Image (cartoon, rainbow, N blue to C red):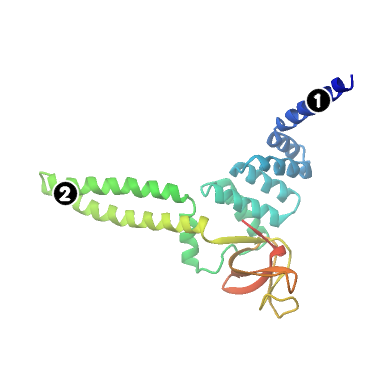
Amino acid sequence: MKHRLIIFLSLMLVAMAAMASGIDYIEQGNKAYEQKQFKKSVEMYERALRDGEAPKLRYNLGNAYYRLNDRAHAILNYERALKLDPGYSDARFNLKFVNEKAKINETTGSNYFSNKLSGWVSHLSSNSWALISLVLFVLMLASIACYRIAGSVVMQKMGFFGAIVLGIMVLLALASTYYMYHHTTKTIYAIVMTDKAPANKSPRNGDKEEFKLPSGTKVEIVDSIDNRNSSGSVWYMIETNNKTGWMKKTDLERI
């Protein structure tokens, strides 16, 4: 009898685990959001993330955090959505909206022209730019073939100048491919999670404070040092708007 009870309880636990794993946390999060239960919505979306990343899920989580007036987490999740899908226009629009409302400058130190150019290039992933490069290269070869075998002068001119224009476009697309690959895999960005977080001159507690940043600010991590043995903290050297300083890891969250 005791063995049967143990077997029965084991089967019940297995069934309950199977039911739990079958819960659609995204759907639960969406329902909670519609009912303006934003804390529950965040909880459901966070649970859904345990099963894997998705741009739409990060976007929804950003919206829920924004409804809770948690600007930093909203920006962080919009940025993570765009890292997964650079062409996600809704996430880009909401990110711009939150930054403008919070009066946060989204740039990380570049000039106006390079910021506009990088913003345009960032609408597509490195894979998309690589595909565009390949298509343009094929068209360039077709233009060269047209120039060499065309029977009329007009077609030869079209092929010649077309090949030049397409060659320039191939180079630009390749440059965009490299930029996006480097941007998403090599360059490390983070969001400031603590309001008025101090950036020090050196990675030490009590050292001279260079400047403070509001929560939600996007920064580039250019170096790091582990001072847990001396100061009990890990420090990141960050750069934003032509300013550089050392900030504690606990004040930042990597995108």
* Residue 152 in picture, x, y percent from top left: 11, 45
Disc 2 and disc 1 in contact, CB within 8 angstroms: no
Q: Which residue is mark 2?
A: 147
Q: Quadrant of the N terminus?
A: top right
Q: Is residue 94 above or below residue 9?
A: below
Q: Residue at x 72, y 41 (%)?
A: 47
Identify the element where label 1 is drawn: helix
Can you tell which quarter of the image residue 20 is in?
A: top right
Question: Which residue type does callout 2 highlight?
Answer: Tyr
For residue 204, side relative to residue 83 (left or right): right
Question: Which residue type does callout 1 highlight?
Answer: Met
Which mark sits nearer the N-terminus, 2 or 1?
1
* Residue 133 in picture, x, y percent from top left: 35, 50
Q: How many numbered marks does the figure carry?
A: 2
Q: Which residue is mark 1?
A: 12
Q: Quadrant of the C terminus?
A: bottom right
Neighbourhood count class around disc 2 (C-alpha, 10 Å): few under 14, some 14–19, many 20 upward: many
Q: Residue at x 47, y 49 (%)?
A: 125
For residue 15, side relative to residue 6 (left or right): left
Q: Nearer the viewer, residue 71 or 255?
A: 255
- Depth check, mark 2 against mark 1: the one in front is 1
For residue 132, side relative to residue 79 (left or right): left
Q: Is residue 223 above or below residue 172?
A: below
Q: Nearer the viewer, residue 42 or 228?
A: 228
